[in-house]
Image: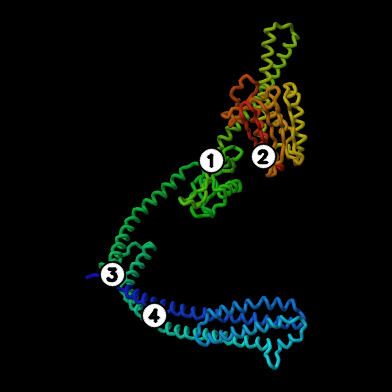
C-alpha cells in the first residue's frame, strides 16, 4: 500500500510532537513549583528582613533623640522621640504576623517586644525629667543598680539583628534549594532534549531521503525553465503527492512550450504592428523612458532629431527640454495650442514650425514609463496665418488713402462749400460720415493688430510708475465719464514697484478697457481702476464697472477677433478692441481674464510680471 505524503508526515511528526509536549509539560510543572515555592519563601523572609531594617532605623533615631536632649535641643529630641515610636510598633506588628521559622523566630520576636517595651518605659521616664536635669545622663548611660537607655538600645538592636540574620539565612537556604532543584531540572531537560533531537534527526534523515530528492529534481527543472529552457521533464517515481507534483510540472512545461510558440509570434506581430503604426505618422514621434533612452522613434523623428534605434540615449533640443521636464515633473500632459508655443527647427533647407505635444506614459499600476513626444507640423498653417495677416495689413493700408478722400468729400459737402443741401441730403451725408469713421477705426485696429502679431518682441519696454500710467489713462477718459455722469475712481497701492512696459501700447490697451467700461455703463454708475501687488512678484490691474455686464455664454469668446457680445448690435464697435488688449498684455508676458454678471457689471484683471524677461 502506498502511503500519502500527508500520512508519512503525520507518522513522522506525531511522535516528536508528543515527546516535546511531555518534556515541555514536565518542565513547565517543575519551573512553576520551583518558582512558586521560592517566591513564597523569599517574599515572607524579605518582609521580616525589611521590617527589622526599618525598626533598626527608627530605634537609632530614638537613641539620637536622647542625645539631642542631653545636648540641650529639647524640642528636636521630643519630636524625634514621638515620631519614631509608631514606626517601631508598626514594624513589630508586621514581624509578629510574619513569623515563618518556628520556634526560634517566635522566641526572638517575643524577646524583641519585651525589650522594646522596656526601652519605651525608660524613655518616657527620661523625658518626664525636666530639661537640664542631671538625672537624665544617669538614665541614658545607666547606674550601678540599673542599666541605662544606651544598654536597652543595644539589646533591641542585638535581638533585631538576630531576627534579621535568621530570615536572611532562611533566604539563602531557599536559594540553595532552588539551585539544586534547577540543576535537577536542567539534567532532566537535557535528557529529554537529547532524546527529542535524536528522534528529530532520524525523522529528518528519513524525510530528506524520501522527499527532498524529488523536490530537488523539481527545483532544478523549475530553475531551468525560468532561464528559458522549456525542454524539461521530471521523472514520476511514486504515486503520492510528490509524484502528482511531478506529473503537474511536466504538464505545465508542455503548456509553456505551446504558449511560447504562440505568444512569441503574437508578441512579435504586435511589436511590428505598433512600430509600423508609429512609422506611418508624418509628424515626428519619440517615446523615451525616464532615463532618456529611446523606446520608439519613427523615421520622421530620426530625420529631424537624428534619434537612434531603440535603447539609445536621446538628448532633446533646448526648445523641447523645458516642456518634457514639465510633463515628467507634473505627471500631466503639456499640450501646446497657440502659435506662440510653437518651436522651430531648420530641416531640409527650410525652417519648419511644430506644436509640441508631450504626454506622460504610465503602466497599469501607475508606474511612470516615460513620455511620448509628438510634434505637429504647423509650418503650412503658420505661413497661411502670416499670409492672412499680411493681406489684412496690405488691404487695410491700401484702403486708408481712398477712405481719407471719401471722408474729405463728405466733410466738404456737409460744410456746404459747393452749395446748400436739403435735409435729406444732410441726413445721408451724416450717416455716410459716421460709417466712414467706423471703417477708419476698423482699418486702424486691423493695422494695429497685424503690427502687434508681427512685432510683439519689439516693444519699447521701459520702467514705468504704475500709478502715473493709470492716472494718465484715466484722465484721458475722464471727460467721457463726466459727460455720462459716471463716477471714475482710481485706487493704487502705495508699495507698487515699477513695471517694464511699452508705455504707448499699454496705455492704448488700458484705454480700450476704460472706454468700453464707460460705454457700457449707464449714467449714475461707477468705473473703478485699482492696482495691487501680487504674491508672486506680479502687479494686478483691475478695471471694474457697474454696467450692463456680459452673458455667461459669451465670456469665453470676448477676446476673439471680430466677436460682438450678443444683444449689442445697435452699439458701435468692431470686435477687435479686446483682441488688441490681449495681444498687448500677452506681448508683455502677462495674462488677462474677464469676470461678469449680466446686469451687475464686468471686471477685467490684468496680471503683469514686475520684471519682464522676454519670450
Residue 587 sits above or below residue 417 on the image: below
Alpha carbon separation for disc pair 4 and 3: 25 Å
Q: Which mark is residue 376?
A: 1
Q: Nearer the viewer, residue 130 or 98?
A: 130
Q: What element carries label 3?
A: helix
What residue do we see at 73% from left, 11% from top?
414
- Left or right: where 484 falls relative to 258: right
Q: Is mark 1 on a helix, strand or loop?
A: strand
Q: How crowded is mark 3: few (under 14 residues within 10 Å), some or many (20 or more)?
A: few
Along the polypeptide, which appears first: circle 4 or circle 3?
A: 3
The residue where tag 3 is placed is 7
The residue where tag 4 is placed is 193
The residue where tag 2 is placed is 589
* Residue 401 visible: yes
The percent coordinates of residue 27 (x first, y second) are 41, 78
Exactly how many numbered labels are in the figure? 4
In front: mark 4 or mark 1?
4
Along the polypeptide, which appears first: circle 3 or circle 2?
A: 3
Along the polypeptide, which appears first: circle 4 or circle 2?
A: 4
Amino acid at each position: 500500500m502506498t502511503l500519502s505524503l500527508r500520512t508519512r508526515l503525520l507518522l513522522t511528526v506525531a511522535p516528536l510532537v508528543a515527546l516535546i509536549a511531555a518534556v515541555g509539560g514536565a518542565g513547565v510543572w517543575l519551573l512553576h513549583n520551583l518558582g512558586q515555592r521560592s517566591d513564597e519563601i523569599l517574599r515572607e523572609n524579605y518582609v521580616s528582613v525589611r521590617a527589622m531594617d526599618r525598626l533598626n532605623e527608627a530605634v537609632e533615631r530614638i537613641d539620637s533623640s536622647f542625645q539631642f536632649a542631653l545636648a540641650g535641643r529639647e524640642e528636636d529630641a521630643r519630636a524625634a522621640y514621638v515620631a519614631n515610636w509608631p514606626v517601631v510598633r508598626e514594624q513589630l506588628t508586621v514581624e509578629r504576623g510574619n513569623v515563618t521559622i518556628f520556634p526560634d523566630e517566635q522566641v526572638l520576636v517575643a524577646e524583641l517586644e519585651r525589650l522594646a517595651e522596656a526601652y519605651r518605659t525608660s524613655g518616657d521616664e527620661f523625658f518626664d525629667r525636666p530639661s537640664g536635669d542631671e538625672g537624665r545622663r544617669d538614665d541614658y548611660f545607666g547606674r550601678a543598680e540599673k542599666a541605662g537607655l544606651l544598654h536597652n538600645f543595644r539589646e533591641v538592636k542585638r535581638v533585631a539583628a538576630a531576627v534579621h540574620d535568621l530570615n536572611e539565612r532562611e533566604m539563602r537556604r531557599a536559594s540553595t534549594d532552588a539551585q539544586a532543584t534547577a540543576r535537577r531540572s536542567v539534567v532532566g531537560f537535557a535528557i529529554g532534549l537529547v532524546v527529542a533531537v535524536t528522534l528529530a534527526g532520524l525523522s529528518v534523515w528519513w524525510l530528506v531521503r524520501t522527499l527532498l530528492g524529488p523536490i530537488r529534481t523539481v527545483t532544478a527543472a523549475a530553475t531551468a525553465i525560468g532561464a528559458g529552457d522549456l525542454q524539461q521533464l521530471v521523472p514520476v517515481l511514486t504515486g503520492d503527492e510528490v509524484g502528482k507534483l511531478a506529473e503537474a510540472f511536466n504538464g505545465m512545461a508542455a503548456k509553456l512550450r505551446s504558449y511560447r510558440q504562440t505568444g512569441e509570434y503574437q508578441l512579435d506581430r504586435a511589436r511590428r504592428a505598433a512600430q509600423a503604426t508609429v512609422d506611418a505618422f508624418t509628424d515626428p514621434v519619440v517615446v523615451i523612458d525616464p532615463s532618456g533612452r529611446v523606446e520608439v522613434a519613427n523615421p520622421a523623428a530620426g530625420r529631424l532629431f537624428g534619434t537612434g534605434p531603440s535603447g539609445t540615449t536621446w538628448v532633446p533640443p533646448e526648445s523641447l527640454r523645458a516642456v518634457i521636464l514639465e510633463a515628467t515633473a507634473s505627471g500631466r500632459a503639456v499640450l501646446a495650442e497657440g502659435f506662440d508655443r510653437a518651436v522651430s527647427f531648420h530641416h531640409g533647407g527650410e525652417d519648419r514650425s511644430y506644436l509640441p505635444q508631450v504626454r506622460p506614459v504610465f503602466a497599469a499600476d501607475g508606474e511612470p514609463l516615460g513620455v511620448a513626444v509628438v510634434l505637429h507640423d504647423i509650418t503650412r498653417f503658420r505661413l497661411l496665418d502670416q499670409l492672412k495677416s499680411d493681406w489684412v495689413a496690405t488691404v487695410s493700408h491700401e484702403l486708408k488713402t481712398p477712405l481719407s478722400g471719401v471722408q474729405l468729400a463728405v466733410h466738404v459737402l456737409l460744410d456746404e462749400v459747393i452749395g446748400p443741401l436739403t435735409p435729406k441730403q444732410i441726413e445721408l451725408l451724416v450717416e455716410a460720415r459716421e460709417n466712414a469713421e467706423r471703417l477708419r477705426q476698423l482699418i486702424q485696429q486691423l493695422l494695429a493688430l497685424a503690427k502687434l502679431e508681427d512685432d510683439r518682441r519689439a516693444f519699447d519696454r521701459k520702467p514705468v510708475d504704475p500709478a502715473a500710467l493709470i492716472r494718465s489713462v484715466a484722465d484721458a477718459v475722464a471727460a467721457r465719464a463726466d459727460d455720462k455722469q459716471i463716477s471714475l475712481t482710481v485706487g493704487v497701492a502705495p508699495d507698487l514697484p515699477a513695471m517694464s512696459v511699452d508705455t504707448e501700447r499699454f496705455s492704448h490697451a488700458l484705454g480700450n478697457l476704460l472706454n468700453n467700461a464707460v460705454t457700457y455703463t449707464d449714467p449714475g454708475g461707477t468705473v473703478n481702476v485699482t492696482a495691487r501687488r501680487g504674491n508672486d512678484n506680479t502687479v494686478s490691474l483691475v478695471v471694474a464697472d457697474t454696467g450692463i455686464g456680459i452673458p455667461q455664454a459669451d465670456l469665453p469668446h470676448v477676446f476673439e477677433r471680430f466677436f460682438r457680445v450678443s444683444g449689442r448690435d445697435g452699439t458701435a464697435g468692431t470686435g477687435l478692441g479686446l483682441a488688441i488688449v490681449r495681444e498687448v498684455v500677452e506681448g508683455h508676458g502677462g495674462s488677462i481674464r474677464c469676470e461678469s454678471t449680466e446686469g451687475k457689471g464686468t471686471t477685467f484683471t490684468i496680471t503683469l510680471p514686475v520684471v519682464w524677461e522676454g519670450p
